[in-house]
Amino acid sequence: MNTSSTAGVVSVVDDDESVRESLPDLLKELGFAARAFLSAKEFLASDGLRQTLCLILDIAMPGMTGPDLQLELKRRGLEIPIVFITAHRDEKIRARMLQQGAVECLFKPFSESALVEALEAAFRARCAIDSRRDSGI
């Protein structure tokens, strides 16, 4: 799957510096344009907000959490497919994130294949969103 020809990016929001450095590099190796952000507030204030095709979002961050950002995006009427990531192995949290609209919730550390599958699901969701918007639904 290569989306480098599209005008959008995969945005990564995580307060963990090692994730912000390594995950965009992996995404670029997989053929995606990628940007990383330290916090939800930094992402919301960026020019990358409207360019984001998919958001890889840490659940637990200081200040605005991943789920808080998800709610803020909904409040603003922005539909961005979200893949949550978390270091806390809790199936209840995972189930709650999926129930609240995330396309996937991966436990750190996750495999490259799990990430690719999550991104494929996110881009299917993105196509559905774009299709609804284009048809006026």
Image: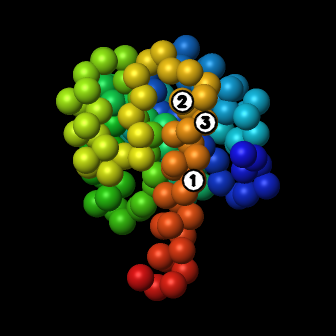
Residue placed under numbered mark 3 in the picture: 116
Give the residue drawn at x 73%, y 34%.
Answer: 30
Q: Position of residue 101 (x, y in %)?
A: 32, 51
> Is the residue under label 2 in contact with that under label 1 (CB below 8 Å)?
no
Query: In the image, is 100 to the left or to the right of 33?
Result: left
Query: In the image, is 1 to the left or to the right of 80?
Result: right
Circle 2 packing at 10 Å, graded few (<14), some (14-19), many (20+), is few
Give the residue drawn at x 52%, y 39%.
Answer: 118
Query: In the image, is 103 to the left or to the right of 54?
Result: left
Query: In the image, is 56 to the left or to the right of 22?
Result: left
Circle 3 packing at 10 Å, graded few (<14), some (14-19), many (20+), is some
- Along the line of sight, the residue nearer the viewer: 60 or 48: 60
Going by the numbered disc 2, the residue's amino acid type is: Ala
Give the residue drawn at x 25%, y 26%.
Answer: 91
User: In the picture, residue 5 is in which quadrant?
Assistant: bottom right
Q: Position of residue 129 (x, y in %)?
A: 48, 67
Looking at the image, is mark 3 or mark 1 earlier in the sequence?
A: 3
Going by the numbered disc 3, the residue's amino acid type is: Val
Give the residue drawn at x 28%, y 60%.
Answer: 75
Looking at the image, is mark 1 or mark 2 earlier in the sequence?
A: 2
Residue placed under numbered mark 1 in the picture: 123
> Is the residue under label 3 in contact with that under label 2 (CB below 8 Å)?
yes
- Along the line of sight, the residue nearer the viewer: 25 or 95: 95
Going by the numbered disc 1, the residue's amino acid type is: Phe
Residue placed under numbered mark 2 in the picture: 114
* In this view, the mark in front (1 or 2): 2
- Along the line of sight, the residue nearer the viewer: 69 or 100: 100
Under circle 2, the secondary element is: helix
